[in-house]
Amino acid sequence: MFKVVGVQFDNADGENRQSILKEIYKNNKYCGRIIGATLKHVLFDGEPAIQIIEDESKKCIGWIPKEDVERFSHSKKAIIEIRKFSDSYYVRLRKMKIPSQGIYVAVKINTKRTGAKMPVYDEGAYTKVLSLVKNK
């Protein structure tokens, strides 16, 4: 897991990233707040940088730290986990893990049965959903 930086700042359009994260966090309770993200490779002050764009809202929620950019230099997608501490939200990022077909089928059946939306295509997200279903 890698820490996402810049989550306390505003985007170029003035929208506050904490407000964006709050909304995403509130709307993704069932999926364990494990969400898909697109990694946008850009230059920032003349150096390679990676902006993190949440897949559903298409909004920037932060950046990969400068020292970790090389690790994600060939990645276009990732998984983010949003957590809340006190009144602030922070984000961790990791590479996507492909789920097995068995886990995929189990999640698809359970989400259809409960009327919940399918989580992001990731083993961690699917495992979280199945653990929530078992605890009900």
Image (spheres, rainbow, N blue to C red):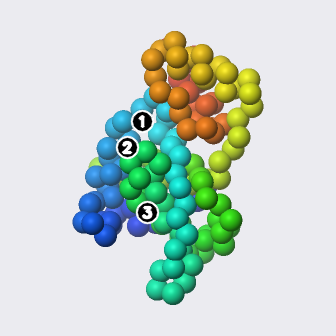
Q: Which percent across, then down, holds residue 132?
A: 53, 23
Q: Which percent across, then down, holds residue 17?
A: 33, 58
- Residue at x 60%, y 22% (from the top left corner): 108
- Residue at x 61%, y 31% (from the top left corner): 126
Disc 1 from disc 2: Cα separation: 6 Å
Q: Which numbered disc covers residue 45?
A: none
Q: Quadrant of residue 103?
A: top right
Q: Which percent across, then down, holds residue 120?
A: 55, 38
Q: Determine whether 23 is above or below 73 in the image.
A: above
Q: What amino acid is found at the position of numbered circle 1 in the picture? A: Asn
Q: Determine whether 10 is above or below 20 in the image.
A: below
The residue singled out by tag 3 in the image is 62
Q: Estimate how packed mark 1 is, as few (under 14), some (14 to 19) or many (20 or more) residues with alpha carbons within 10 Å.
A: some
The residue singled out by tag 1 in the image is 28
Q: Nearer the viewer, residue 56 or 80?
A: 56
Q: What amino acid is found at the position of numbered circle 2 in the picture? A: Ile
